[in-house]
Image (cartoon, helix red, strand yellow):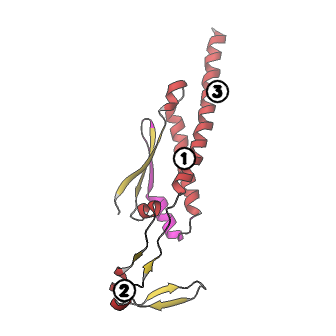
Amino acid sequence: MGKRFTYTRINAKPLKADFDVDTKKVLESTKRVLHREIKTELEQETFSPAAKKALTKAIQIKIKPNSLQITVNHPAFLPLVDGQTTEQMTWLTKARRPIPIITDSGKMIFRSATAKSMQDGKWQHPGRAPSTFIERARKITREHIIERVRKEATKSAKRAFAKVGGA
């Protein structure tokens, strides 16, 4: 498929510093939340259902000892996250058939990309702003981590007080 690259990591090492927290449990729970949030955010993007399915399938979240690692294996992911500049679509001159275009009114028309139309500066890709759906999912996941750590710390404190009270 496409080039595999690591997009980001969510570090859980600070969880061990102050509390007796089961980091693995927190990371497993966080992985489920992160995957669900990425899928939810991706569903809100304006892609075709097939593109959404392919991108969702290409995202893998691995649990490392102290973090979550998001790895993506899809060629469209990097231009999606980084954005795309305006450029001339010179590859369209290789098309063997007319190219279907949907106009603003929703009507489908067919055009051919020729060397002359390329010289005239036509066939410009409009570009794309960077997508922030991963960042939005990370923000929601951070909120989940804070809540989860709060619960785990409360459980840990109750266990500690039970040991002290029972001794």
Q: Is residue 21 above or below residue 73?
A: above
Residue denoted by label 3: 154
Say which quadrant the N terminus sits in: bottom left
Viewer-nearest residue: 90 or 65 = 90
Q: Nearer the viewer, mark 1 or mark 2?
A: 2
Residue 147's x, y, as percent? 63, 37
User: Residue 66's image quarter?
Assistant: top left
Q: What amino acid type is highlighted by mark number 3?
A: Thr
Q: What amino acid type is highlighted by mark number 2?
A: Met
Viewer-nearest residue: 87 or 50 = 87
Whether residue 113 sits left or right of residue 156 in the image: it is left
Residue reaching furthest to the top: 167
Q: Give the extent of the magenta segment.
A: 45-66
Residue 132's x, y, as percent? 53, 57
User: Residue 40's image quarter?
Assistant: bottom right
Residue denoted by label 1: 32
Q: Is residue 165 above or below residue 4?
A: above
